[in-house]
Image (spheres, rainbow, N blue to C red):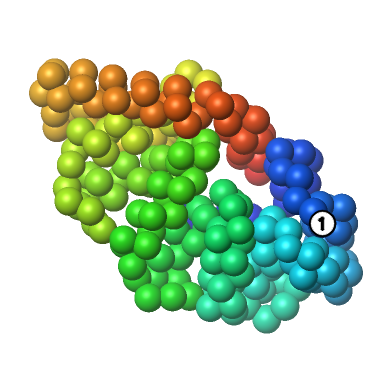
Amino acid sequence: MKEMLRMGLLTALLSVFAGPALSDTAKGIAAYQNGNYATAMRELEKAAAAGDEQAFFNLGVAYAEGKAVPRDLGKAVALYRKGAEGGSVLAAFNLAQAYRKGQGTGQDYRAALKWYEFGAKRGDYRASNELGLLYVEGKGVERDLVEGFAWIYPATHQMIMDDSAMANAMQLASMLDKQQIDEAQARGRIYFENYFEPNADLVEALLQDKRGR
């Protein structure tokens, strides 16, 4: 699951977040979806100036897509960083993706790990899956197949059942013995209970967005 999250989260995701400039962000996203890019950028920039972390995320998407403004991945990463530092889980995921792939910034697995973990601990199952892969690959962290499986496991829960995570879990199961699998699943259940159940609204919003593509 390596793609950047797109703009177009008005119905599914904005209801989860309530930043100080939410109405301007919503107006900006609606205008962007309708192809009214000048209005979209104006509303999103207004919301960002007021400190809405989701506006920074969506401005980053606009620069990454290159529809409303000339494509500028470096600018997109800078905006994702501002959004992530302000608490946006969505911006954190895109920032982690950029660091992992070296798009718009230097490749930095440790930074990717940091922001995937930030998102995973706030209910982003996509980030949990990617975090697990970094442990499996030993990128940015010491290689640990059990810990990797544990982070991938929540995204395989019946509430989520992410295809990428399911495939990753099946492959990992073939690489571990029963004791390791049991340990990974037990740890993964704790992660699910601690980080995903309390953030069920975000999980459902991300699933709705995925179904709507």
Q: Which residue is mark 1?
A: 21
Toward the viewer: 59 or 64? 59
Toward the viewer: 140 or 152? 140
Please state if 69 lies on the left or on the right of 159 as rendered: right
Specify whether residue 212 is in view.
no
Q: Residue 138: x, y in percent?
A: 20, 52
Residue 153 drawn above or below residue 213: above
For residue 6, which quarter of the picture? bottom right
- How busy is the neighbourhood of tag 1: few (under 14 within 10 Å), some, or many (20 plus)? many
Q: Residue at x 50, y 29 (%)?
A: 196
Residue 133 drawn above or below residue 103: above
For residue 207, which quarter of the picture? top right
Quadrant location of the C terminus in the rendered image: top right
Tag 1: amino acid: Ala
Specify whether residue 107 is in view.
yes
Please state if 211 lies on the left or on the right of 148 as rendered: right
Residue 25 drawn above or below residue 174: below
Task: Give the total of numbered labels.
Answer: 1
Q: Residue 73: x, y in percent?
A: 55, 75
Q: Residue at x 72, y 71 (%)?
A: 67
Q: Residue 135: x, y in percent?
A: 25, 46
Q: Residue at x 41, y 40 (%)?
A: 128
Q: Residue at x 20, y 33 (%)?
A: 146
Residue 158 drawn above or below residue 23: above
- The residue tagged with tag 1: helix, strand or loop? loop
Q: Residue 17: x, y in percent?
A: 72, 43
